[in-house]
Amino acid sequence: MAIERTLAIIKPDAVADGNVGGIVGMIEASGLRILGMRMVRLTVPQAQAFYAIHAQRPFFEGLVAFMTSGPVVVLALEGEDAVASWRGLMGPTDSTKAGPDTVRGRYGEDVSRNAVHGSDAVQTAAVEIPFFFPTCQLI
C-alpha cells in the first residue's frame, strides 16, 4: 500500500446540519491524517472551475448552485491508500444506498445532498488539493 493524499469536502448540507464534527471524527477514527482544513464559501466562478469536468452534464448548474448555497469545509487528507479509504468511508454517491457506517449513510439525504465529496483518483487529488491548499499551507 502507498501513502496518498486526497481531498475531502464537507458540503453545505452537512455544514448547515451541524455535522462537521461527526464527519471529522469519522475521518480521524479511520486513520486518515488531516493535513489541512478550512471553511470556505465558494463563489459561483470557483464552483464552476472546480466542477468544470461536469460542465456539459445536465446537473452542472444545480451542483454549482448547491455548492455555493452555504459554507463548505475542505480537508486535505493523507494515509495509506487515502483515495480508496476516503471513498470507502464516504459510501455510495446515493446516500439512500449507503450503509450506516459510512458518512453518506449517516449524514446524507440522497444523490445530490450527500454530505461529502472526495477525489476519485490520486491524479485528481493532485489537482483538487492545490485548488484549496497551496502546498505551503499543508503540514
Image: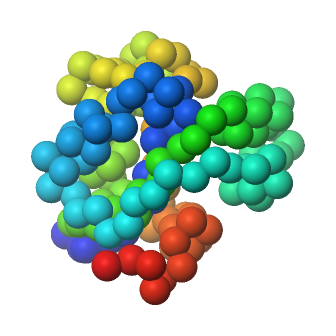
Q: Quadrant of residue 131?
A: bottom right
Q: If the image is split into quadrants, where does the N terminus sit? A: bottom left
Viewer-proximal residue, 88 or 63?
63
Colour scheme shown:
rainbow
At 60% from the left and 24% from the top, the residue drawn is 112
Left or right: residue 20 compared with residue 57: left
In the displayed structure, 107 sits above or below 47; it is above
Residue 105, position as x, y percentages in the image: 33, 21
Question: Residue extending furthest bottom?
Answer: 136
Residue 69, position as x, y percentages in the image: 68, 32
Q: Can residue 52 be seen in this view?
A: no
Left or right: residue 3 compared with residue 98: left
Residue 84, position as x, y percentages in the image: 33, 53
Viewer-proximal residue, 75 or 58?
75
Q: Can residue 76 be seen in this view?
A: yes
At 15% from the left and 55% from the top, the residue drawn is 31
At 25% from the left and 73% from the top, the residue drawn is 3
Left or right: residue 82 compared with residue 8: left
Left or right: residue 101 compared with residue 134: left
Residue 118, position as x, y percentages in the image: 46, 49
Q: If the image is split into quadrants, where does the C terminus sit? A: bottom left
In the displayed structure, 45 sits above or below 26; it is below
- Count numbered badges in the picture: 0
